[in-house]
Amino acid sequence: MREHTCAIVLIGNEILSGKIQDSNAYFATRELRQIGVALKRIAVVPDELQPIAEEVARCAKQFDTVITSGGVGPTHDDITMEAVAIAFGRELVVHPELARVLGEHFADRRAPGMKMAEVPAGAVLNAAGDLRFPTVQLENVYILPGIPQIFEIKLKSLLGRFASDPYFIRTIYTSAGESVIAEHLNTCLAAYPDLLLGSYPKISHSEYRVKLTLESKDEAYLARAFNRLLDLLPSEVVVKVE
Amino acid sequence: MREHTCAIVLIGNEILSGKIQDSNAYFATRELRQIGVALKRIAVVPDELQPIAEEVARCAKQFDTVITSGGVGPTHDDITMEAVAIAFGRELVVHPELARVLGEHFADRRAPGMKMAEVPAGAVLNAAGDLRFPTVQLENVYILPGIPQIFEIKLKSLLGRFASDPYFIRTIYTSAGESVIAEHLNTCLAAYPDLLLGSYPKISHSEYRVKLTLESKDEAYLARAFNRLLDLLPSEVVVKVE
């Protein structure tokens, strides 16, 4: 099965200080899952060069793709380009095409200087749907802005290149708690070790106590594991399956 | 000024696969900020031993306090205790007090085995409000469950020990975009380098284009920086201050 691994790095003092709740990573988790990408890590780091650079360098080595969010505007706290440059040992350089787009954009207004045209040396540009500003990419790192409306458009325009074999999912809801069903889950996993099996207890939920999610990229394998687990669980504790 | 640094590690396949949106880290960001704690990092890692152990080990070295969320129940995917033990090079051992509490709790029901009484050797227990189950702590790492209702009670009962000098905050909303105000922010920061200055653009917001947050643990310093920035900004672009 084709697997594509990914990490998301959010550059965000505003998240760490509780001023806003992240929506970009949450949006990305669902979009990536839908196209079969295995998201392995989300990190929120402050607007500081070293923490961003270290996180990006580590993730870029470990995963197929890294997506960053935030820190790409014209102000003092927009340091993601510089941090990614440090992560790869590159210089910051003005990208002529970005300079041209910026020049057009600010033709009749006060120009912000060339800060927003600076990228790590070797970076390439990717078209971003209808947006005027392309998405900057260095090696396997895609550098997206933090503003949700723009992040979402830019992410969607990139998804085609990450698409992988899809995940198939089945769900079982039980009226019994985790303690009662734990050994059945273990038995099922012993027979189906590649099954992605999640066990999520809910407290004070009227309909069920545990939601079990069974996932695999192999639809037939999933079907067999699902049937096996249904056989193992006492039928009176199974409230619903999906 | 007294500073206490913190990291949050979420153990959560269900977050990485987009099944749920995190609420624990978001809850913690606001609680920690309110008591002056500097949250420096949030990481979401999968339910796998090595990624959890590596993240916890790194954070425990780098920050005053680490809070983990998730992976502490009785099922196969509950491996946080083992991962934290690996992070500190400890064995997993049955904690007699946890075994006693579990025994009481399951006195009239099917017992889950001793898995939930296992902790890294050397771990201590902290009372957790009205909850029967105490919070396990190993060195500077606090191990909390992922269920939001329990996470929140346990976190609140720990906050007293992290409390630090508070942050003071002022806010300025501008009708001008970031490009126009960037140089004034730089001038202000040159004079007040310790100011925590955030610049957050909004697109298609009717009232303002940029929200500026000014923060410091030194109230007088903040007042001077705030006045300086107000002087620097063209008065016609300042929409509102808080």
Image: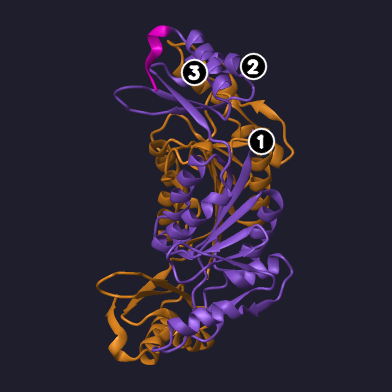
Chain colours: A purple, B orange
Residue assigned mark 2 = A190
- In the rendered structure, which segment of residues is drawn in magenta? A235-242
Depth check, mark 3 against mark 1: the one in front is: 1
Front-lying residue, B98 or A209:
A209
Q: Is residue B54 above or below residue B233?
A: above
CA–CA distance in space, label 2 to label 1 = 18 Å
> Label 3 amino acid?
Ser
Q: Quadrant of the N terminus of chain A?
A: top right
Residue at the image position 70 percent from the left and 42 percent from the top: B87
Residue at the image position 68 percent from the left and 55 percent from the top: A60
Residue B208: within the magenta?
no
Q: Secondary structure at mark 1?
A: helix
Q: Chain of mark 1?
A: B
Q: Secondary structure at mark 2?
A: helix
Q: Can you give x and y, in whole percent of width and height, for residue A161 in the image?
A: 58, 51
Whether residue B35 can be seen here: no
Q: Secondary structure at mark 3?
A: helix
> Label 1 amino acid?
Leu
> Label 2 amino acid?
Ala
Q: Same chain, marks 3 and 2?
A: yes
Whether residue A122 can be seen here: yes
Q: Can you give x and y, in whole percent of width and height, for residue A156 in the image?
A: 47, 54
Residue assigned mark 1 = B49
Residue B30 as seen in the image, left or right of residue B112: left
